[in-house]
Amino acid sequence: MVKEMDVNMDTISTKVESTISHLKKKYDVLLALYHKLERTCGLIYVEHPDDQVCGELSSSLVLKLCWIMFLLAKGKILQMEEDLVISFQLLLCVLDYFIKLVPPAVLNEPYKSLSAMSINSSARTYRRTQNRSIRTSKTDTEIKVIEELCKEHDCNLDEVKNVYFTSFIPFLNSLGITPSSGLPEVENMSSKYEEMYLKNKDIDARLFLEKDETLQYDRTECLQLERTPTKNNPGYDPPVVLPQTPVRAAMNTIQQLMMILNSASDKPSDNLISYFNNCTANPMQSILERTENLSHVFREKFAEAVGQGCAEIGSQRYRLGVRLYYRVMEAILKSEEKRLSIHNFSKLLNNNIFHTSLLACALEVVIATYGTTTSLDFPSIYFISPNAASRNASQSESMNMETDLSFPWIINIFDLKAFDLYKVIESFIKAEPNLTREMIKHLECCEHRIMESLAWQSDSPLFELIKQSKERGGQPDQAEPPNCFTQPLQHNHTAADLYLSPTKSPKKKVSSASVYPPPDGQHALANHPQKPYKSTSLSLFYKKVHWLAYMRLKNLCSRLLSDHPELEHLIWTLFHHTLQNEYELMKDRHLDQIMMCSMYGICKVKNIDLRFKTIVTAYKELTNANQETFKCVLIGEGRYDSIIVFYNSIFMQKLKTNILQYASNKPPTLSSLPHLPHSPYKFSHSPLRVPAGNNIYISPLKSPYKFSEGLLSPTKMTPRSKILVSIGESFGTSEKFQKINQMVCNRDHNLKRHAEVSTAPKPLKRLHFDIGQDEADGREHLSGDSKFQQKLAEMTSTRTRIQNQKLNDGADTSTTDQK
């Protein structure tokens, strides 16, 4: 039923859509946790115990008790019930409780032995926690069961113990449940849950126990195919790869973050302290005070959003964010020191907005890592969907702000402007090379949200920068060369440049003294005539906005105007003109609203029959689509209406003269079309095909030694990756792979250069793996690198043998030579 409502989501109200979105997330979490509980109980409890005393205590009864108690605890403790990680940690607490409560005879090993050891000490723990002074530690014997559960499920023991003592034990006390009470009655537990369900009236999760069809998911939709590039062979049937369970995926992502931060501290390192001491004004005291003050804000707001019993969990998350904050800050300073050959970063390190933005970015990574929710039609990490996340300045944003940790929650609680956070995102990603692909994509989505709407809110500093730029007689992106649109989105600007701008035009070399002047501002500029300053942050922002805008426009045009390709350039010119010269139209509005109005206006004057309803229908198919974008457009003074009303009453009135010019014989000069590169963040893991017709695919290089940093563990390697690691270890470090990549890239460049002067370039006879040492006659080298060539020969021989074997077995080998 919900799927059917998705088709016509634009016909229902924002409140209904928000409620449905909440129900879907809650259902996904409940389904994942119930399946996890089923599998775990099957491993823990004996299905048919032999002991007559335990005959009536079946595994199905324990499953029912565990599930209903978990539902009660989850409803009482968590305000934000779709939090998968805290919910799973709570489920482990419930399992720990029942393992210690049931007779050891109904348990499988190792829980049978662990339960017998901890029964007595567990009873003492409950007696100690009856008073309000709740202890936060256990004896070694008492934690054996929970320790084993955490080990089995890759869960952080300290975090689970924190949930146990600060949330689960008070929950048991509130129900009057003690170990001496024995097993709770199913009817009693169920009646208590019934009261809570009737109050909330959303999902009766007890139906999972009855295998009710209304709560069963079509598991065939969970499957995803992992394919390497293949030839078009009708007989080839690619293998189906079962996805990770949502809980396992979430735990793995958290474990990766933990491994990155294992060596980090929540205090400044010696290197950072050295940077602080080199400053004209030492920023250390203000940094420590700011970090402490924001910790109280974060803890309080986290508890309001998730649940008052989860305040300590908020503190744990905050400490992780602080570790990442100091780690990335040190990496940025090292990079700046190398780039500018200076040691005094006083102006940057005494910039309050820089530090708040950097800390907010680090905390967003932590929140997103822990805030992964399940989506069974997308089995990998699922962040907040564009439907739920793409909130602009409308009433729904304030409605969800207090109970949703998703972006932009972090900048709201820190009272940080989105435009200021944008300045640090790219430098943050580049400074932390161990961020997972999912985290990089998440930060890039945050950056897109800032560019499409958040930076255009009426209180944004962006408008003041644009105003200053206009007063200087320039355009917001004039600092970039005129042909910048035809070049890839590459630049050398860093967070330091953006936070300390406006600076001089990047066309001229800027000395380090002018970029990092001392706090009193006295420097060598007195010897030079004053020239207008240009904002690097504004220039780069507009450049990125133009790329994002054109990328979306091109996508929409391909769906609607494939028969009129010439209109794309006209629409872009109007779109670009509006962003440059009528930027006030973007205030408290969305980039896509201007895009759709530009498309409709051009089609109108060109007599192309394209209605707004058709545009909206196609727009809903885009990945970034959200119904509020076309349903709730600001008309004026807090009044919202549909996009067609906005077009007629605001957009058309403002741009009528300009739009009519496109109907004349002398239309406006067309704007340059931006080059559409891949993401500026290098995280793609997709195989790339080698040019010149070769049936060879290259995957991005991964160091075989990075699993020590938590990015790749031997237990998570595929058979193919283990072979490659073995080969790499046999002849040296990954630097040899870097040489191969460099030679392949050089060969590709040479082929392209020859292609310009010859229609049939002569192919190279072989790849040269040793830089500057290859002989023209192809004779073998006597260097140690010949071992690598022998390895390649062995690989080729092995691959050929496998191919022949598969042919003999009647198997398809069309993909073997593509790996």
Image (cartoon, rainbow, N blue to C red):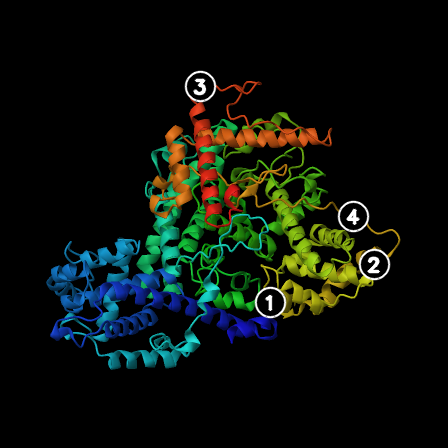
Distance of mark 2 from mark 1, alpha carbons? Answer: 29 Å
Of helix, strand and loop, which one carries label 4? Answer: loop
Looking at the picture, how far across and down is residue 494, in whole percent? 54, 38
Mark 1 is on which residue type?
Gln
Q: Residue at x 27, y 66 (%)?
A: 42
Q: Nearer the viewer, mark 2 or mark 3?
A: 3
Mark 3 is on which residue type?
Ser
Q: Residue at x 26, y 73 (%)?
A: 60
Q: Earlier in the sequence, mark 4 or mark 3?
A: 4
Q: Residues within 10 Å of mark 4 (few under 14, many from 20)?
A: some
Of helix, strand and loop, which one carries label 1? Answer: helix
Identify residue for label 4.
670
Distance of mark 2 from mark 3, alpha carbons? Answer: 72 Å
Identify residue for label 1.
627
Q: Earlier in the sequence, mark 2 or mark 1?
A: 1
Say how many tags the image has.
Answer: 4
In the displayed structure, 14 sits above or below 236; it is: below
Task: Using the rendered view, name the quadrant where residue 49 is placed.
Answer: bottom left
Distance of mark 1 from mark 4, alpha carbons? Answer: 31 Å
Of helix, strand and loop, which one carries label 3? Answer: loop
Q: Nearer the viewer, mark 4 or mark 3?
A: 3
Q: Residues within 10 Å of mark 2 (few under 14, many from 20)?
A: some
Determine which of the numbered discs, if any, sits on residue 783 in the image.
3
Give 334 or 674, whichever is nearer the viewer. 674
Query: Would you say the residues marked 2 and 1 are in contact, meaning their CB atoms lie under 8 Å apart?
Result: no
Q: Residue at x 57, y 66 (%)?
A: 394
